[in-house]
Image (spheres, helix red, strand yellow):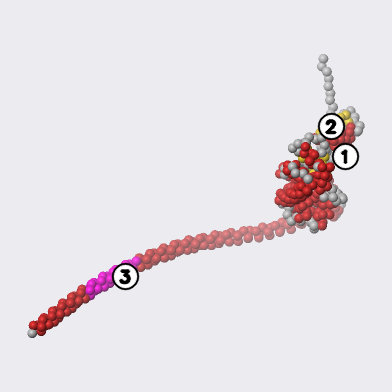
């Protein structure tokens, strides 16, 4: 009985707990539902607020756009009104101008009609006047016209002759002045230093005992050296120096470099000599290539065959009257190109011919003929242009110059060779030329004294005034110049100046 009561009580407690748990669950569910409803209402309010704000912004944007469109439309209407007003004003001006032109056209038509009537009256008066003149003079119109034309023609011929003389004299003066300006400008823009070379080279020695080592046992070293280089070694009493003599400048330079290396090294024997000479030959070949490239870059000449470029580089070891041939060729190229540019000639032809004009001098000791002919043969082989070939052929007047560029190369060659300091001669030849120059002048009658000045580029002649008058002075200068041309060989040109003066003196006691 007690157990049943206990069980019944436990069951009642379980029911009670279940009811309480159900009540709590229901309460919680209701509370969650209320919170969910509250959140839904809050969200709905937020959405409504956002919607109102979006509608408000859209209305404001629409209002702004409408205002902008209305402003643009207003401005366009104002602009259209301005354009319309300008068009109306232009139409009015055109109408006025058309009206004015109509009036002018009518006035012009009336003047033309009046002019036609005046021309008819003039023709009638001219015909009557011609008839009256024919009756008075007894000549027909054709005869009178012929007489007038002949008189006018004769007068015009005289005036034309005087005018032609004046024009020729003026053109000659202007051409001479312009030529001097062109040459002076070219010389001013081109200043190339000239190197001085000779047919011998001197190698300094550290001591005279080195001479014996250069000669070697029984002369084997010097014989080997001379055989390999093709030069002569002059070992004499000159202290601490050996002279290298040779006509070929390249061989002389190779020998100088090789001997300098041998002397500085101290080991001198045939095998060492051969190795040193081969090394010097390679250095000279490199120097030739570098000088050829330098010449082409300085002058702007391109497209030269390698064989021709090598000959150009060899000119750096060739001299003429002491003037370095490569520097001379570069200078001639610059001068010819500058003068060609000044007068509107072909600059590239003048530049190329100036650089190549002395090409034959690189091998004239190996090939027979003048250096001009040698250069022509070489360049023809490599298909050089006819214009350049002609300028080269004519630069020493071996043929008559037929182009402006040929004349410019002649002038540039003469300027480069004759300017002061460009060339030098052996002292003995120089003194003999000056002596011969003064002797030629002194051979003429009436010459009192003569002086060769400016390194032989000018000779001044003092004449006896009682034997030579002014006209004879001009003739004497021309005769002396002609004789100098026939009897002397000289670079450049020589100015002959004859001076005639009368002096009167008295002694006051």
- Determine crowd level at label 3: few under 14, some 14-19, many 20+ residues with C-alpha closer than 10 A: few
In this rendering, position of residue 200 left or right of residue 26: right
Q: CA distance from mark 1 to mark 2?
A: 16 Å
CA–CA distance in space, label 3 to label 1: 119 Å
Quick check: 229 left or right of 89?
Answer: right
Q: Nearer the viewer, residue 394 or 496?
A: 394
Residue 471 location, x and y as percent? 87, 34
Q: What's the magenta region?
A: 32-57
Return the disc, 2 or 3, that comes first in the chain's sequence: 3
Query: How far separated are the C-alphas under marks 2 and 3?
Result: 121 Å
Nearer to me, 410 or 106 = 410
Please tell me which of labels 3 and 1 falls first in the chain: 3
Using the rendered view, name the quadrant where residue 103 is placed: bottom right
Examine the image and state in which quarter residue 199 appears.
top right
Numbered tag placed on residue 51 in the rendering? 3
Decide if residue 478 is in sight here. Answer: no
The residue closer to the viewer here, 315 or 227, is 227
């Amino acid at each position: 009985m007690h157990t049943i009561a206990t069980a019944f009580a436990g069951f009642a407690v379980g029911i009670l707990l279940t009811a309480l748990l159900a009540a709590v669950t229901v309460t919680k569910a209701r509370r969650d539902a209320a919170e969910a409803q509250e959140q839904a209402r809050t969200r709905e309010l937020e959405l409504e607020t956002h919607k109102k704000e979006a509608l408000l912004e859209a209305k404001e944007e629409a209002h702004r756009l409408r205002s902008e469109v209305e402003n643009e439309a207003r401005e366009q209407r104002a602009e259209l009104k301005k354009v319309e007003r300008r068009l109306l004003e232009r139409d009015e001006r055109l109408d006025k101008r058309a009206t004015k032109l109509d009036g002018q056209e009518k006035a012009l038509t009336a003047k033309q009609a009046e002019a036609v009537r005046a021309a008819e009256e003039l023709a009638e008066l001219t015909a009557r006047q011609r008839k009256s003149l024919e009756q008075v003079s007894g000549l027909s119109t054709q005869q009178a016209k012929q007489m007038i034309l002949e008189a006018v023609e004769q007068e015009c011929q005289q005036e034309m002759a005087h005018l032609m003389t004046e024009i020729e004299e003026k053109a000659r003066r202007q051409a001479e002045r312009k030529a001097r300006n062109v040459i002076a400008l070219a010389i001013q823009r081109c200043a190339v230093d000239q190197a001085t070379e000779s047919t011998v080279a001197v190698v300094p020695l550290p001591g005279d005992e080195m001479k014996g080592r250069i000669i070697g046992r029984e002369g084997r070293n010097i014989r080997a050296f001379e055989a390999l280089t093709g030069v002569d070694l002059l070992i004499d009493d000159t202290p601490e120096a050996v002279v290298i003599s040779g006509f070929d400048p390249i061989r002389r330079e190779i020998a100088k470099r090789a001997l300098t290396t041998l002397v500085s090294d101290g080991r001198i024997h045939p095998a060492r000599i051969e190795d040193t000479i081969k090394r010097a030959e390679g250095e000279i070949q490199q120097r030739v290539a570098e000088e050829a490239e330098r010449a082409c870059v300085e002058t702007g000449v391109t497209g030269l065959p390698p064989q021709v470029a090598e000959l150009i580089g060899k000119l750096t070891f060739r001299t003429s009257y002491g003037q370095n041939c490569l520097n001379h060729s570069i200078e001639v190229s610059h001068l010819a190109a500058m003068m060609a540019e000044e007068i509107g000639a072909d600059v590239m032809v003048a530049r190329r011919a100036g650089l190549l004009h002395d090409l034959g001098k690189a091998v004239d000791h190996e090939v027979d003929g003048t250096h001009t002919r040698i250069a022509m043969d070489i360049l023809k082989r490599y298909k050089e242009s006819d214009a350049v070939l002609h300028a080269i052929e004519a630069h020493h007047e071996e043929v008559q110059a037929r182009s402006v560029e040929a004349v410019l190369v002649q002038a540039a060659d003469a300027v480069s060779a004759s300017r002061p300091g460009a060339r030098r001669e052996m002292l003995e030849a120089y003194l003999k030329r000056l002596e011969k120059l003064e002797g030629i002048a002194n051979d003429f009658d009436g010459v009192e004294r003569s002086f060769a000045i400016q390194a032989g580029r000018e000779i001044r002649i003092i004449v006896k005034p009682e034997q030579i008058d002014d006209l004879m002075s001009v003739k004497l200068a021309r005769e002396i110049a002609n004789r100098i041309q026939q009897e002397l060989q000289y670079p450049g040109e020589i100015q002959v100046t004859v001076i005639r003066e009368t002096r009167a003196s008295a002694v006051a006691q």
